[in-house]
Image (tube, rainbow, N blue to C red):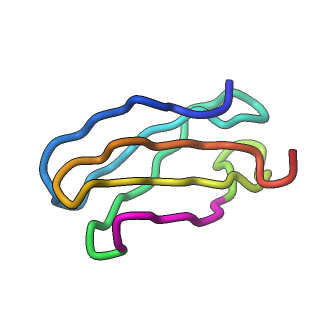
Amino acid sequence: MPGNDGLLITGLIEEDLSFECPYCGEENFTRHEPEGGRFQRFVTDCGVCCRPILLQIHSDGTDIISFQADPENP
């Protein structure tokens, strides 16, 4: 199931975020670093199946507004 739209996390401190791999469905984790900007987009590999996952984080400067985990190559 791609994406985790609607996730709301308060405060702009480094946060550990969990997400489901869009390929194998296993839980993975990444760290949100606020100093990375309001729109962050990067690729990480699944810790289980090793396939590339495109992560997109949007914050308003205070809170995370959306967090998506999608296949890099759909």
Above or below residue 73? Residue 10 is above
Pick the residue in front: 72 or 51.
72
Q: Is residue 73 left or right of residue 5?
A: right
Q: Is residue 46 left or right of residue 67?
A: right
Pick out the residue farthest to the right: 74
Pick the residue in front: 45 or 37.
37
Above or below residue 33? Residue 25 is above
Q: Position of residue 54 (x, y in %)?
A: 66, 55
Q: Is residue 4 magenta?
A: no
> Which image quadrant is residue 2 in?
top right
Magenta highlight range: 37-44
Q: Is residue 27 left or right of residue 46?
A: left
Above or below residue 35? Residue 71 is above
Please tell me which residue is depicted at 38% across the width and 58% down the height of the picture: 31
| Quadrant (top left/top right/bottom left/bottom right) for the C terminus | top right
Please tell me which residue is depicted at 66% across the width and 37% down the height of the picture: 21
